[in-house]
Image (cartoon, rainbow, N blue to C red):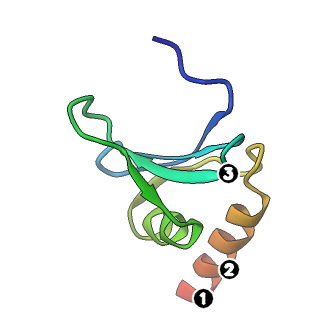
Amino acid sequence: MTAPRDRTVHAILSDRTEIVRYDRAGKWYAEPADPQSRRRLITITEAVRLTVAEGIWWGVDQPGGLSFDAKVRRALNEKK
């Protein structure tokens, strides 16, 4: 099965959970790598928190991620 075209991965967490945004709906999800686990609807604030706390990859400048990128940068600067 192929992923919907409006799905963009913005970050990957240490447990391989993907932080994704579906463009048409404008919603953020935490999608576990385990296909038996269910994806979880999250807010952009939660997406940022997870990315800063547990992220191993952050896809800077992904389509639809302007606000997300700015919030992650701000959180990382505050963490220093």
> Residue drawn 45% across and 11% down?
1
Q: Do residues under tags 2 and 1 come within 8 Å of each other at their CB atoms? A: yes
The amino acid type found where label 2 is placed reads Arg
**Furthest residue to the top?**
1
User: Which label belongs to residue 26?
Assistant: 3
User: Mark 3–mark 2 contact, CB under 8 Å?
Assistant: no
Q: Is residue 12 left or right of residue 63?
A: left
Return the residue found at the far front. Answer: 25
For label 2, the residue is: 74
Please name the amino acid that badge 1 sits on: Glu
Mark pair 3, 2: CA separation: 21 Å
- Tell me which corner region of the image, top left, top right, bottom left or bottom right, holds residue 54: bottom left
- The residue that label 1 is drawn on is 78
Q: Residue at x 68, y 63 (%)?
A: 68
Left or right: residue 36 versus residue 5 is left
Could you tell me which residue is drawn at 36 percent across and 44 percent down?
Answer: 39
Callout 3: SS: loop
Q: Amino acid at mark 3?
A: Gly
User: Of helix, strand and loop, which one carries label 2?
Assistant: helix
In the displayed structure, 48 sits above or below 16; it is: below
Task: Say which label, 3 or 2, has the lower sequence index.
Answer: 3
